[in-house]
Amino acid sequence: MGRFSQLIGWPPPRRASVPAGTRVYAIGDVHGRADLLQPLLGWIAEDHARRGGEAALHIVVVGDLIDRGPASAKVIDLLTTETRGDAHYHFLSGNHEEMLLAILDGEAEGVPAWLDHGGAETLESYGVDPARFWDDPEALPRVLRAALPSRHLAFLRGMVDQVRIGDYLFVHAGIRPGVPIEEQAGRDLRWIRKEFLTSPVDHGPVVVHGHTIVPKVEYRRNRIAIDTGAYRTGRLTALGLEGEARWTLTSRLDRA
């Protein structure tokens, strides 16, 4: 395992900052890569200590913790047992968490799509063989409820849609341009893509988001994309923010 750390104060696309006395790290889509998340959390702690001061530490995880990668259950374990300390954690719900929760609530019609988009790997991480559920989707909600530890289910149901810190708004996918922040639909926050990515509109806050894979953190005037495709590329990235400064930390394996 290698560590790549890009500790540079990037000039902002426009002036934006977090409140004085606050330091924020936003982690992109994990997608079952516990092997990348665990060292990244350690490096965030080290980087926070190295920067010193009395800044309050906020860690925002922008959703899609599960599916596609091999260790979704371990990812949830890490974030429910090993992340307390003095940090303020904010866990955002992604479209993959939305799909899983819908199935847990009995919506079996979504089972084939979920399995095809990484749900099979999540089932395997909980010790459940996914093979039978393509043909018998109605059986999955009951089996899944039995397989998930209660603290995992409580964690997933406790995730939020958005977090605002200073001049930054953190969401999973993006926002619908032209709609006031307080009127944004949860489904857009978790699923939107083209309308948001192609919009030049000033949204007010700078939107920090995942959902769409980029080769490296992408800075635009009105948004910052931080999903570097952990499950596919072996790179999981965190964006650091303090005052007007920005930097990145990346947990990386030589091969995904």
Image: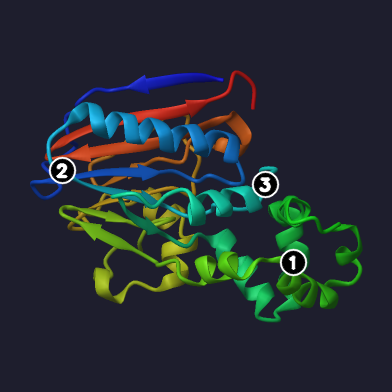
Tell me the amino acid under the disc marked 2. Ala
> Are circles 2 and 3 on residues that touch, CB within 8 Å?
no
- Calculate the distance from the C-alpha at mark 3 to the C-alpha at mark 1: 18 Å
Is disc 2 placed on a helix, strand or loop?
loop
Task: Give the vertical position of 167 relative to 240 (above or below).
Answer: below
Q: Would you call the spot at circle 1 few (<14 residues within 10 Å), some (14-19), or many (20 or more)? A: few
Residue 68 marker: 3
Q: Is residue 171 left or right of residue 65?
A: left
> Are circles 2 and 1 on residues that touch, CB within 8 Å?
no
- Calculate the distance from the C-alpha at mark 2 to the C-alpha at mark 1: 40 Å
Which label's residue is closer to the chain start, 2 or 3?
2
Look at the image and tell me whether residue 56 can be seen. Answer: yes
**How are the residues colored?**
rainbow
For this rendering, which residue is in front, 188 or 136? 136
Name the residue rendered at 48%, 32% in the picture.
39
Is disc 3 placed on a helix, strand or loop?
loop
Residue 55 marker: 2
